[in-house]
Image (cartoon, rainbow, N blue to C red):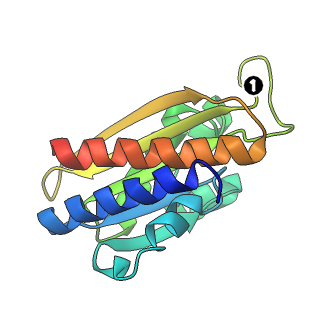
Amino acid sequence: MSASIAPASALVTELADLLIEKSWSVTTAESCTGGLVAAALTDIAGSSAWFNQGVVSYANRAKVELLGVDNALLVQYGAVSQEVVEAMAAGALARANANVAVAVSGIAGPSGGSLDKPVGTVWIGWAVRQTSSELSVTSMLNLFTGDRSIIREAALVEALRGTIQRVRSA
């Protein structure tokens, strides 16, 4: 068991308790994590009570078709951007019967980075349904270091921490 799996497990338990307490559910939209967040959430027996669905939208076309991300955002800002990850989170929430969505898009490496967006650049976005017609959408830029596995696991942990924070404060 790697060092970050145990913290992720504890974070999932904490999030599950919060979601159950509020009678809420969560949905995910993932790119560079390839479903790690959804997998961590569904590792707990009974997660169907609070986990709605997960979308792995690795390709830009999937972001457009499955999450409703405007292709113009992808062209202008790139898949690894605040604008796109926020659109992913909002799109996931719009397509799911959930109260909170978490989205992840980044460059896990070992290649694919650039001067502007080096390997380890990961945007995490959240959408929280305030009312039936009002959403709160926020995001956070992370610059992780390490190999692909470490970057993806760090993104998982930060996605869970941020989701807990947003559920707790809603």
**On the image, numbered disc 1 is attached to which residue?**
118
Q: Is residue 103 left or right of residue 118?
A: left
Residue 82: where, in percent of width, then height? 51, 32
Q: Is residue 78 above or below residue 9?
A: above
Q: Is residue 42 left or right of residue 105?
A: left
Residue shown at 51% from the left, 55% from the top:
6
Furthest residue toward right: 111
Residue shown at 66% from the left, 35% from the top:
78
Name which quarter of the figure residue 161 lies in.
top left
Residue 73: where, in percent of width, then height? 57, 38
Q: Is residue 101 above or below residue 139?
A: below
Amino acid on which disc 1 is placed:
Pro
**Residue 107 appears in the picture as rendered:** yes
Residue 61: where, in percent of width, then height? 68, 58
Name which quarter of the figure residue 151 lies in.
top right
Q: Nearer the viewer, residue 21 or 87?
A: 21
